[in-house]
């Protein structure tokens, strides 16, 4: 049976490179939406040390408007993918000149970029951006205050080293990544568990602050890994247990910044390129999409 005759729900093309190659050759309208972490670059404890293969960038460029990325990370900032791409070349201007940046959505779906590195944040207000800008310093201040408590046993230099690795000052998804603290407290897991709960409390306080400023419907916290969602649709933190770290990433994100919605945004853009019409409207963005999966499927 030809690949094109095989039902979509029975394919595992990501595990079958021969069938994938065949489909890429035979089909005219292919749309590939790819996540980034661990796919095009290896996972490491310190994201600032990541590297990316220039051959991958060249392949993505050759696919043109049939290839987009969709990631919870970001394109820009000192921890963004663009910086990793620029370090790949002897001249950091080459990606801009040749259009070798990865086009698509970051921040879960609220940060759009073309292949020349032009970035926008459709549907995001100035007030929301201002609030997000202050979050990394609040995370750092919280960790600094907690870390000076005698029970943690951290000297000033070690604490600052941990904070620098933990606080990810992303523009639209500021994050506390506790991996380094989990390593530091590997022989005292109860200390990591305590710190984990403290950071969850901080995220709850940040959400309350946003509500006080009239931004109660603007943000949510993405816990990675997590235990699914509660009855209100909020993600549930996975508590650490012994050597199991549970939730390590606490991402303070914009509502709508979820990949299911990001797929819709990219599909809307792709159909415009094929037909000249936007099925969901020219201005459709992740902030406008429904949050319930049933409603999302109905929209598709």
Image (cartoon, helix red, strand yellow):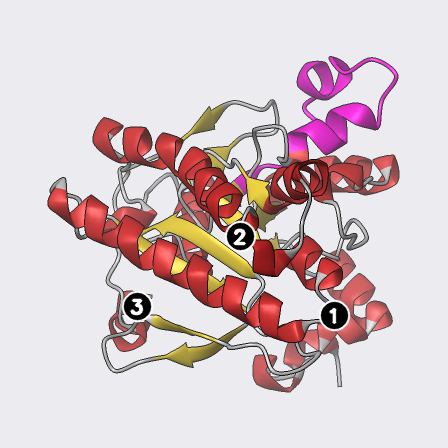
User: Which label sits on residue 149?
Assistant: 2
Residue 219 in picture, x, y percent from top left? 29, 51
Check residue 100 in the rendering and tell me which mark sits there, or answer none. Answer: none
In this figure, which residue is indicated by the disc labeled 3? 296
Real-space CA distance between mark 1 and mark 3, rounded to the nearest whole angstrom: 24 Å
Q: Which residues are magenta?
A: 82-104
Q: Is residue 251 above or below residue 86?
A: below
Tell whether 19 sits left or right of 242.
right
Indicate the quadrant containing the C terminus: top left, top right, bottom left or bottom right: bottom left
Can you tell which quarter of the image residue 1 is in?
Answer: bottom right
Residue at the (26%, 35%) spot, across then down: 128
- Badge 1 marks a residue whose secondary structure is helix
- Of the numbered discs 1 and 3, the one sitting upstream in the chain is 1
Alpha-carbon span between mark 3 and mark 2: 46 Å
Residue beneath the point at 29% across and 34% down: 131
Nearer to us of marks 3 and 2 is 2
Relative placement, left or right, of 164 versus 91 is left
Question: Does 246 sit above or below residue 281?
Answer: below
Q: Which residue is mark 1?
A: 14
Q: Is residue 173 visible?
A: no
Estimate the x, y position of residue 37 in percent, counting from the top left: 68, 54
């Amino acid at each position: 049976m030809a690949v094109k005759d095989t039902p979509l729900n029975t394919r595992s093309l990501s595990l079958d490179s021969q069938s994938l190659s065949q489909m890429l050759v035979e089909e005219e309208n292919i749309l590939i939406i790819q996540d980034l972490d661990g796919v095009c670059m290896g996972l490491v404890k310190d994201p600032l040390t990541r590297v990316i293969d220039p051959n991958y960038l060249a392949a993505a460029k050759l696919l043109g408007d049939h290839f987009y990325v969709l990631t919870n990370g970001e394109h820009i900032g000192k921890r963004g993918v663009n910086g990793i791409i620029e370090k790949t070349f002897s001249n950091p201007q080459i990606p801009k000149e040749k259009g070798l940046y990865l086009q698509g959505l970051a921040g879960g779906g609220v940060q759009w970029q073309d292949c020349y590195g032009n970035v926008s944040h459709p549907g995001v207000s100035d007030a929301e951006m201002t609030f997000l800008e202050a979050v990394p310093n609040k995370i750092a201040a919280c960790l600094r205050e907690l870390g000076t408590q005698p029970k943690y046993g951290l000297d000033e230099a070690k604490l600052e080293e941990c904070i620098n690795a933990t606080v990810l000052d992303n523009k639209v998804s500021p994050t506390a990544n506790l991996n380094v603290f989990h390593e530091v407290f590997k022989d005292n897991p109860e200390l990591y568990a305590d710190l984990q709960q403290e950071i969850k409390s901080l995220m709850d306080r940040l959400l309350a602050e946003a509500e006080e400023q009239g931004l109660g419907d603007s943000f949510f916290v993405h816990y990675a890994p997590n235990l699914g969602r509660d009855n209100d649709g909020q993600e549930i933190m996975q508590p650490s247990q012994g050597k199991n770290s549970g939730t390590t990433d606490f991402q303070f994100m914009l509502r709508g910044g979820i990949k299911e919605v990001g797929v819709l945004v990219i599909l809307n853009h792709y159909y415009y390129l094929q037909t000249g019409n936007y099925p969901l409207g020219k201005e459709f963005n992740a902030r406008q999409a429904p949050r319930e999966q049933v409603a999302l499927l109905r929209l598709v």
